[in-house]
Image: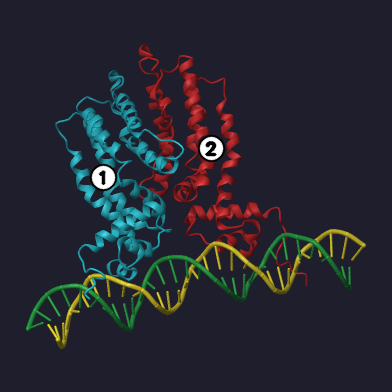
Chain colours: A red, B cyan, C yellow, D green
DNA sequence: TCTGTTACTGACCCGTTGGTCAGCAAGGAA
DNA sequence: TTCCTTGCTGACCAACGGGTCAGTAACAGA
C-alpha cells in the first residue's frame, strides 16, 4: 500500500534536530531535556539522534555552534564602518545591535553558557575565542578610534569595555527570570545607558589626559 | 566496645547539611549534585537527609534562604545612612557593598537563581520580593534624595536603577565563566562604574529639568 | 541493667533516561 | 521483480539516582 511511514532526508536532519534541541534547551534547560523529547519534536526516532550526534553533549555543542557561527561574520563586519564617527557608531549600529539581542534567540546561548558552561570547558573556550574576546577587542578599537580623532577623552572604559555590554547580559537574564514580576523596557534602558557612556567619554575635553 | 559510630546532634544537622549542599551546588550545579554526595560531605547517611528535608528541592530552597535571610536585615539598614550625602553614599557604602559581592558566597545564589530559577517559580518570587525589589527601591529612594537636596539632576536612572547594579551581575557570572581566560579587576571596574554614574547624575546642573 | 525513645544507617526499590542494535522500509540499479 | 544499500525505527538494556524503610546504635530515665 506504499504508505510512507517516514522519509529519508539525510541532509535536512541535523539542522532540524539542532533546531528542536535549541528550542527545548531554552525552555527547560539542558539537563531537564530528554533526548526523546528532542527526537519527538524533530519528528524522528530517538535512535536516529545517535546516528547524527554521538552523545547528548555533542548535541549541545552543535546547538551552541549553530547559533554562533552564522553571527561571527556579521559581528566582524560591524567592526569597520569607517564613514561613521565613534559617537555615531555607538548611537547607531551599536545601540541597534544590543537592542536586538534580548528579543533574539541569542538569549538561548547566554542561558546555556551560564548554566552548562562550568561543566563544558571546551565550550567556554570556544565561546571566549569566537565571541567574547572578539567583541571586547572591537569595542576597544572603537574607543581608541574615538580618542585618536579627538572625539573622546582617554578613559578607563578602554580597559573595561565590559561595562558597555554588562547591561545586555543583565537584561537578558533579568527578563527571563523576573519577566513576570517586572517588564523591563530594554530599548529605553539601553538608550539611556549609551547616553551615559558617551557623555562620560566626551565630558570635560580640556583635561584630555593621556593616562 | 562502645565504639562511637556516629553522633546524635539533631540541632546541628540542618545547618551542616545546608552548608555542604551550598558548596556542592556552587561547584557542580543543582542537577549534577547527588543527594548522596551532599550526605557524604556533611558526614551523614543519605537516609538522614530525608529526615530533615522532604525532597532534594526542599534542600535547594533551604540553601537559598540560608544565604538570603541573614543578609536582608543588613541590606535594610544600609538604606538609611542619613548623615551622608547621596554622592558620599554611592562612593562609600554602595561601592564597598558591590565590591564585596564577587568574592562573597553570594555568587552561589546568583548562579543558582539563573540556573534553577526557571524551574522553581516560587523561589524566584521569594527572591524577587526579598532581594530584588527591595534593592531597587532602595536605589530609587537614594536617587530621589539626591535630587531633592539638589545634588543630582533628575535622570532616567530613577526609572532604571538596574543600570547601577548590572555590572555586578555581569562580573559575578563573567568571572565564574571566563576566570581562566581573563582575570577581571572588579574593584577598579566598579569604581570606574560608580564614577561614571555620579558624573552623569551631576552633570550640567543648569538644566535641572524635572522630567 | 533493663527499657523506651529517637537520631541515624544503608541496603533496597523503582521510575527515569542516555545509549544500543537487530531489523525494517525506502529508494536506486539492473 | 529482485537485490543491495542505507536512512530510519522502536523495543530493549544498564546505570543512575531520588526516595523509602526495617532495623540499629546512642542516650535517658529508673
In this rendering, would A187 be left or right of B124?
right
Which residue is tagged 2?
A129
Q: Give the answer, above or below, for where C25 lies relative to A66.
A: below
Seen at 56% across and 50% down, the residue is A61
Seen at 45% across and 50% down, the residue is A115
SS for dot 2:
helix
In this rendering, would B14 be left or right of D12?
left
**Distance between mark 2 and mark 1 Cα atoms:** 38 Å
Which residue is tagged 1?
B134
In this rendering, would A61 be left or right of A95?
right
Observer-nearest residue: A94 or B1?
B1
Is the residue under label 1 in contact with that under label 2 (CB below 8 Å)? no
Observer-nearest residue: D27 or A130?
D27
- Dot 1: within a 10 Å radius of its alpha carbon, few (fewer than 14), some, or many (20 or more) residues? some
On what subunit does the disc labeled 2 rest? A
In this rendering, would A176 be left or right of B164?
right
Which label is found at residue B103?
none
Residue B76 locus on image (x, y percent): 20, 44
Residue B28 in view here: yes
Seen at 72% across and 57% down, the residue is A9
Residue B158 locus on image (x, y percent): 30, 34
Seen at 78% across and 72% down, the residue is A1
Q: Give the answer, above or below, for where B4 lies relative to A11.
A: below
SS for dot 1:
helix
Quarter residue C7 falls in: bottom left
Residue B151 locus on image (x, y percent): 23, 25
Observer-nearest residue: A45 or C11?
C11
Q: Give the answer, above or below, for where C4 lies relative to A150.
A: below
Residue A38 locus on image (x, y percent): 57, 59
Residue A45 in view here: no
- Dot 2: within a 10 Å radius of its alpha carbon, few (fewer than 14), some, or many (20 or more) residues? few
On what subunit does the disc labeled 1 rest? B
Amino acid at each position: 500500500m506504499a504508505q510512507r511511514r517516514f522519509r529519508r532526508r539525510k541532509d535536512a536532519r541535523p539542522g532540524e534536530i539542532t533546531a528542536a534541541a535549541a528550542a527545548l534547551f531554552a525552555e527547560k534547560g539542558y539537563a531537564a531535556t530528554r533526548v526523546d523529547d528532542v527526537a519527538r519534536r524533530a519528528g524522528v526516532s530517538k535512535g536516529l539522534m545517535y546516528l547524527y550526534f554521538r552523545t547528548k553533549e555533542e548535541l549541545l555543542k552543535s546547538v551552541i555552534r549553530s547559533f554562533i557561527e552564522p553571527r561571527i561574520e556579521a559581528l566582524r563586519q560591524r567592526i569597520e564602518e569607517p564613514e561613521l564617527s565613534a559617537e555615531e557608531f555607538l548611537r547607531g549600529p551599536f545601540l541597534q545591535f544590543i537592542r536586538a539581542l534580548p528579543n533574539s534567540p541569542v538569549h538561548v546561548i547566554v542561558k546555556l553558557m551560564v548554566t552548562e558552561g562550568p561543566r563544558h570547558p571546551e565550550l567556554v573556550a570556544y565561546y571566549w575565542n569566537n565571541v567574547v574576546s572578539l567583541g571586547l577587542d572591537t569595542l576597544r578599537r572603537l574607543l581608541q578610534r574615538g580618542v585618536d580623532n579627538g572625539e573622546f577623552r582617554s578613559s578607563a572604559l578602554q580597559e573595561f569595555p565590559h561595562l558597555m555590554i554588562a547591561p545586555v547580559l543583565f537584561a537578558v537574564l533579568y527578563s527571563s527570570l523576573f519577566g513576570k514580576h517586572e517588564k523591563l523596557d530594554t530599548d529605553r534602558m539601553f538608550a539611556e545607558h549609551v547616553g551615559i557612556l558617551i557623555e562620560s567619554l566626551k565630558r570635560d575635553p580640556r583635561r584630555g589626559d593621556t593616562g
